[in-house]
Amino acid sequence: MIKFLLLFLLPLSLYASKILSFNIYDKKDKVDIILTFDTPYNGVIKQKSNDSNIIIKLEDVSIESPKIKKLSSSHIKSITITQIKGYTEIIADVPPLVNLEVSKTPDAYALRLRFIASPPLSNSLQTKENNEISQNYYIFITLLILTAAILFYMKKRVSVKQSKDSKQENFLSHINSVSIRFQKSINSQNSVVMLDFGEQSYLILIGKSNILLDKFTQNRPVTESEFNSILQKRQKEIDAFFSDNKDSKEYLQSYKEKAASLRYES
């Protein structure tokens, strides 16, 4: 008697839960398949998928007979439920971009299989991406133009500086056998130098205008302090070359005439 009882209870030990029914709810945006069990289902659920199928394995679950259902839904084409040794296999034939969500009721007497499509790329999202591409394009063009302007400005400054340096070098190259006795920068563009040529020394303003300020045959400065002393005495005259007022311009013209007489004096 006990042996017959054990044989009767053996199937119950092999399958803890049994599928009593399954219902399909085809909605506009999803398809729900509800499975109900005779006992609370707490078994292991395994899932895998390929290009056209989603396969669910419910361990420790049985079903009386295989179930096949074809659907005309955009989320699922057909579903097959088959009992295999030790588990029940559910195969869903689905279109691309369809995902499966599995959930149980709080009492575990029912299992919901929800087939839902992945959110498509809407026109608004595509428009947003196009707008972002367009914005990135304009930002790139703006940066390109700005970079070109900066490079042009830097090139122009370098060219101007090279032109000024070339002007100074050309001026000095006309004086053969010349040595620089002293030199002092007035600003970033102008300097005062004292050149020795033969028996004479020349005090010259070099920069925007190369102007002979004075010449010395005797009493030439020997030390740096003597050279600085000469510059201090002529500070007002030097400042006049960089002033924009009318009196200074008249003074500058007068000074140029005086310098010219020194320049061509035999």
Image (tube, rainbow, N blue to C red):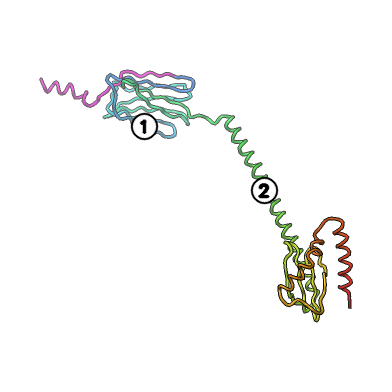
> According to the image, label 2 marks what residue?
144
Secondary structure of the residue carrying tag 1 is strand
Circles 1 and 2: CB distance less than 8 Å?
A: no
Q: Position of residue 257 (x, y in %)?
A: 89, 67
Q: Position of residue 237 (x, y in %)?
A: 81, 64
Q: Which residues are magenta?
A: 1-25
Q: Quadrant of residue 83?
A: top left
Q: Quadrant of residue 244?
A: bottom right
Q: Residue at x 59, y 29 (%)?
A: 124
Q: Residue furthest left?
A: 1
Q: Residue at x 78, y 73 (%)?
A: 173
Q: Position of residue 76 (x, y in %)?
A: 44, 25
Secondary structure of the residue carrying tag 2 is helix
- Position of the N terminus, as image quadrant, is top left
Query: Within the magenta stretch, is there residue 10?
Result: yes
> According to the image, label 1 marks what residue?
47
Query: Within the magenta stretch, is there residue 76?
Result: no
Q: Residue furthest bottom?
A: 199
Residue mark closest to the camera, 1 vs 2: 2
- Position of the C terminus, as image quadrant, is bottom right
Q: Quadrant of residue 238?
A: bottom right
